[in-house]
Amino acid sequence: MLDLQGVSFEIEGENGTEILNGIDLKLYDKKIYVITGPNGGGKSSLAKIIMGINKPTSGKILLDGQDITDMNITERARLGIGYAFQYPPRFKGLKVKELLEMSASRNSEKVNLYDLLHDVGYS
Ligand SMILES: Nc1ncnc2c1ncn2[C@@H]1O[C@H](COP(=O)(O)OP(=O)(O)OP(=O)(O)O)[C@@H](O)[C@H]1O
Ligand SMILES: [Mg+2]
């Protein structure tokens, strides 16, 4: 079970704002949960807090009773937590040729450029 206890997330600085305010949430094993809400409501921020991309300003996150609040992304990934970005990441600095080679090496049957680019998030 993933257990969020009073998780808050604030952006510091001049234009600082509270994005998550005291979230208490229990997510049980072998269930699928969907979190819905308006644009800018904090869904992605919550997911990033669970993955460890962002650290909560206050509150705790427990996974099967273990406090993972101070664990980094890699440590959380080892425990089985994953995160799929809303938009596919772009690998800056790679040439189109390199992207195609990366995709082609995994798709020996595909010869269609569109499919190859699609597989690496570029179409
Ligand atoms: N790093 C940041 N710095 C400043 N503001 C941020 C940051 N991250 C998120 N926000 C703000 O926090 C609020 C929640 O954003 P978030 O992306 O979590 O919403 P969302 O529910 O995922 O929205 P959407 O439905 O558009 O994906 C927004 O007002 C956003 O601008
Ligand atoms: Mg989002």
Image (cartoon, rainbow, N blue to C red):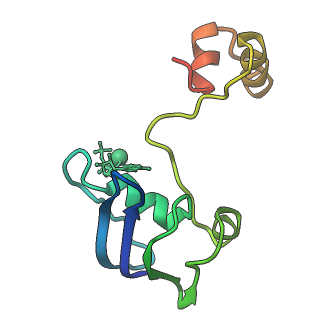
Q: Residue furthest left?
A: 38
Q: Determine the image quadrant of residue 117.
A: top right
Vertical placement of residue 34 versus 21, above or below: above
The residue at 30%/63% (across/down) is 18
Number of dots carrying numbers? 0
Residue 25 position, x and y percent, is: 33, 78
Q: Residue furthest front?
A: 14
The residue at 38%/53% (across/down) is 44
| Residue 2 seen in the current view | no
Residue 17 position, x and y percent, is: 31, 59
Vertical placement of residue 74 versus 102, above or below: below
Residue 90 position, x and y percent, is: 60, 28
| Residue 121 seen in the current view | yes
Q: Is residue 98 left or right of residue 13?
A: right
Q: Is residue 33 left or right of residue 51?
A: left
Vertical placement of residue 47 versus 80, above or below: above
Q: Is residue 12 left or right of residue 77?
A: left
> Of residues 40 and 86, which is closer to you in this image?
40
Q: Is residue 105 left or right of residue 14?
A: right
> Of residues 33 and 97, which is closer to you in this image?
97
The residue at 46%/71% (across/down) is 56
Q: Residue furthest bottom?
A: 65
Vertical placement of residue 94 versus 22, above or below: above
Residue 6 position, x and y percent, is: 35, 82
